[in-house]
Image: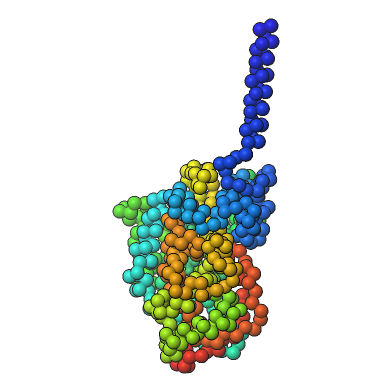
Amino acid sequence: MENFLILFSIVSIATLAFITRILKDRRPKQDLPPGPKPWPIIGNLNLLGSIPHQSLHHLSQKYGEIMLLKFGKFPVVIASSPEMARQFLKVHDAVFASRPALAAGKYTAYNYSDMTWAPYGPYWRQARKIFFSEVFNAKRLEFYERIRVEERRNFLSRLGSLSGEPVGLRDHLYCYTQSTICRMIIGDKYMSKSDELQEMVDEWFLLNGVFNIGDWIPWLSFFDLQGYVKKMKALHKKLDSFHNFVIEDHLAGRAAENDVVHALLQMVDDPNLGVQLTRDCVKALIQDLLVGGTDTSATIVEWAVHEILRQPRIVEKAKEELDRVIGRKRWVEENDFPSHLPYIDAIVMETCRLHPVGTLLGPHYATQDCNVAGYNISKGTTVLINAWSIGRDPDSWAEPEAFLPERFVGKETDMLGSNFGLLPFGSGRRRCPGHNLGLKLVRTTLANLLHGFELKLVEDVSMEEEYGLTTHPKHPLNIIMKPTLPPYLYS
Ligand code: HEM
């Protein structure tokens, strides 16, 4: 009888536990953001498609401004409205200021030693400080203006000499932004390697934007099913040998004395630095500047040209402003912005609204559990801010799909992080440190293309996108560019 009672108790407790568990599983999880039901193993990876920000935008129409997905077994939250961006990037900025440890950061950024992939913490803070003291403060940027002017003039002269021929604008833009950034960061000497470097930068952006299955389903990482990790390792080898070449040159005194590489090399093993800077760290940080500065600025100009060539009235209005303010005897300079050329500036803003080059910003990562707008977000969740979707938010923007620079004219609109409806550079701790430099390049390049040339299409403009860490037009434009200013300006 006693045995029977014990057995009866055990069975009852087990049954009760089983029923409680089932009931608990069925209870709606009101404290988690809504989202599609995940499949075993892959989670919701099947929903991403080849242009993830668009797929996520469509999903947000169904599930709302904050949604929870699973990439493999990992939680990923998508913020698709200005208010949700504010929650993650301002209200709870410190919790979400880290990055997930993805293969791209490990294999193409010296084990997360650049600033882009570094986890939030003392190393990242130190890197940001170094970037500001050596590159991005107003004085350093002014010091390098000479280089930007020279490279811009070379670019405009090259285009001038191609008058009448169809020109592949993208190649010229990339070549110009790259030579400008290279000269500022590593010096004048490496221009002969610019094609090689351009190829590496393109591949870096591609591989840093991919959704690598092994990141999200770790037991599959060994198989590297998409071949991305193999490509990352090969790219790292090429980049590393380029950086070694540059560093050896600098150490041997064969390069200029006042560039950023020199400044960084002097910090290697400096005992006064809070976190030790190794030679690999220097390479990672240089790489960050080289890649961060090239593709982004060129891509915005490219998107702007795609948009305005579809609307001749915008080109006319811009040229009218340029004729009136600049006249026909000189090129546009950095200090003409932003106050003297409000319409050109409005074109840049409108381009950034519809075509933020980092459509999902960089991935953010929760370092603690956090309640966001009433939802529980657990430590270890990756957060993607859909800046592409936010720029199309119908509550923030009238006629959100229309390219209308006029919407910005006569208004003070911030695009450096305080207006959460327009986030081309992100916001908060991880906001782009290069925004100042980037805007200088974008504004003067676009303005001078419009000021100095008649731009004629030789084919239809396609607005299709090609996704990556920066999202480009899928089909680069060929245009005929006829110089319109006095010939001496192009020589
Ligand atoms: C107009 C051009 C540019 C645009 C649109 C742009 C956009 C962005 C965006 C969206 C981010 C990610 C923000 C986030 O994750 O929340 C970022 C980060 C970054 N950008 Fe830029 N950027 C531009 C120019 C530059 C330039 C010129 C440089 C350097 C020469 C640069 C270096 C970086 C770096 C190092 C980061 C990583 C910051 C971090 O993770 O803490 N960017 N940028």
Task: Give the answer, above or below, for where 24 lies relative to 11.
Answer: below
Q: Residue at x 40, y 79 (%)?
A: 340
Residue 446 percent coordinates (x, y): 50, 78
- The residue nearer to you, when weighing 443 against 403, is 403
- The residue nearer to you, when weighing 293 against 299, is 299
Q: Residue at x 33, y 70 (%)?
A: 139
- The residue nearer to you, when weighing 444 against 152, is 444
Q: Is residue 477 visible?
A: yes
Q: Is residue 158 visible?
A: no
> Residue extending furthest left?
272
Would residue 166 appear left or right of 379 to someone viewing this image?
right
Would residue 59 appear left or right of 413 to someone viewing this image?
right
Give residue 436's quadrant in the image: bottom left
- The residue nearer to you, when weighing 103 against 282, is 103
Q: How is the image coloured?
A: rainbow
Residue 449 percent coordinates (x, y): 51, 82
Give residue 335's quadrant in the image: bottom left
Q: Residue at x 57, y 73 (%)?
A: 403
Residue 326 percent coordinates (x, y): 42, 86
Q: Residue at x 65, y 51 (%)?
A: 45
Give residue 357's quadrant in the image: bottom right
Would residue 136 appear left or right of 84 to someone viewing this image?
left
